[in-house]
Image (cartoon, grey):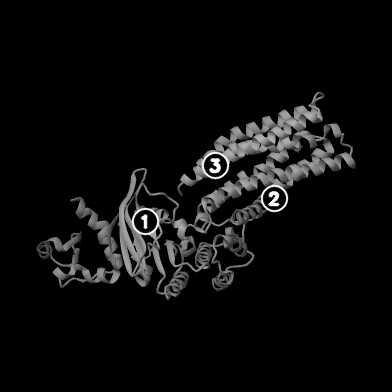
Amino acid sequence: MSDAIVVRHMKKKLGNFTLGPIDLHLPEGCVMGLIGENGAGKSTLISLLTGLKHPDSGEYTLLGEADAGLVHENLGIVLDIPGFPSSLTADEIGKLVAPGFANWDAELYARYCREFALPDKTRFGKYSRGMKMKLSIAVALAHHPRLLILDEPTGGLDPVMRDEILDIFYEFMQDGSHSILISSHILSDLEKICDYISFIHQGKILLSDEKDRMKEEYGIFSGSKSRLAGLGNAVKAVRQTASVCEALVLRQYCPEARPATLEELMVFLLRFGKENHDE
Amino acid sequence: MNKVWALFRGDVRSVVRCNKILLVMIFGYQVAYVFGALSFLGILTVVLGGMLAYTSIAMDERDGWNRFVLTTGYTRKEYVLSKYLLAVVGTIFCALTMGVFSLIGITVGKMNSDNSILPLLPVLIGGTLIMLSVALPLSFWFGMEKARLLSILIIALACGFTGAFAGFTEGNDGLPFQGWSFTGLMMIVVSVIILAVSVMISLKVFDRREF
């Protein structure tokens, strides 16, 4: 299986913040979720992959090409803030974007607009956040891309709308050669659709692996401090209060640990893992 | 080039929709010029026509389209070229309509052909394009927010340019028609050269810009 995305030692410095070095790969036919707190570097990474920012060092390939511009026909991009001209309607935006893609499918675009119940005559600037995001997704899908790069596509949407959008991504993934890189704060969404998860924290990838393997490998231990001390290097992060002692542990060394959810993994790795590391 | 035209058409649509007052103002100035023989207003309309590209860039930044366009199959080069196309077409369109209004003024109105803006049009087009050649790279480089400060300088230049030509045309000792023809031709040639350099600078600047 070839890789849809390969990132090698990519670095980018932005003021006091440094992203990387990032190493990442997403096999074709898979969905990877990027998880991290605000300011962790998710959007910066996506900006680098989509050509909106230029890396200081390192390299990346999308569908085997070293430049987002070279694969734009096969690339669908949804940014966190959809930015079409606010005075245009959905139909006019379709006509504006169509010449940009050789494979533009006007019928498919119109179908998405109908399915998403996007009003014909309303200007983009008058759309709600959910409608803007839906239009952005319609544009990203209407040229039959093979790879979708999505930055917070479900952020700020209500659960019904989020579910609708996730269904679209499911449908997109029915073709085995399609892939998605998606960043989101909504872990339940990622839990539903992702095959791979990458945790990003302060510009670095803390953990990147198959979701199922991660959930098998890591567990949450609740118990005494003395037992915890006995687990040694199997403990990856600890949360201690006066009454509770919980830890993220490797389950092979701690059979009594229960499987960790993505949310627990995120909280332990990004919050308490850091504290442990600092110590 | 097809893609540049597509972006240009989108720009025209957006600019017309969002700047109706400005467009009415340009039209009003042109009418006022014909009836009042005010060269200053006539010249200003051509400058304003060129500055529609500047307005378009500002609208794109407000909407985030200058960033988003790069994710929709268009290249940075095509985006930059579409703005220059808008600047050139806006300038020439306003100059031509100004010419038509002048002819109307001369033939059916009371306008004195000596006060007509017609011989000045090539000079006006050239001058406006030179002004935009300076302004556009700045807006691509710094973004409109920062370029806005620099635009104060540009507006001052525009006003100076406008005032100077108004003085020439309304004064008693303006250049003879042949003089304006030569000056106009030279201005067009110089402006095309400066515009070409400006396009190259803008392409380099926008290519390095990060979003």
Asked whether the residues under marks 3 and 1 belong to the same chain, the reply is no
Q: Which chain carries label 1?
A: A
For the point 77% across and 33% down, the residue is: B181
* Mark 2 or mark 1, whichever is nearer to me: 1
Quadrant where the image shows the N terminus of chain B: bottom right
Is residue B149 shown above or below A224?
above
Give the quadrant of residue B169. Answer: top right
Q: Which residue is identified by label 3?
A: B200
Is residue B211 shown above or below A124?
above
Whole-angstrom CA distance, mark 2 to mark 1, is: 45 Å
Three-letter amino acid code at the position of disc 1: Tyr
- In primary-sequence order, the first of circles 3 and 2 is 2
Is residue A80 in sight in this rendering?
no
Q: Mark 3 lies on which chain?
A: B
Disc ID at residue A60: 1
Q: Where is residue B56 in the image (x, y as percent from the top left)?
A: 61, 48
Front-most of residues A275 and A184: A184
Q: Is the Cβ of the residue at disc 2 closer than 8 Å to that at disc 1?
A: no
For the point 40% across and 71% down, the residue is: A177
Is residue B100 shown above or below A210?
above
For the point 65% across and 36% down, the residue is: B191
Is residue B129 shown above or below A237?
above
Give the quadrant of residue A101. Answer: bottom right
Whole-angstrom CA distance, mark 3 to mark 2, is: 32 Å
- Judging from the image, what secondary structure is the residue with disc 1 in? strand
For the point 67% across and 37% down, the residue is: B128
Sort mark 2 into few (<14), some (14-19) or many (20+) by Cα contacts within 10 Å.
few
Can you name the residue that lies furthest to the top here? B173
Three-letter amino acid code at the position of disc 3: Met
Q: Which residue is identified by label 2?
A: B20
Q: Position of residue B29 (x, y in %)?
A: 76, 41
Q: Mark 2 lies on which chain?
A: B
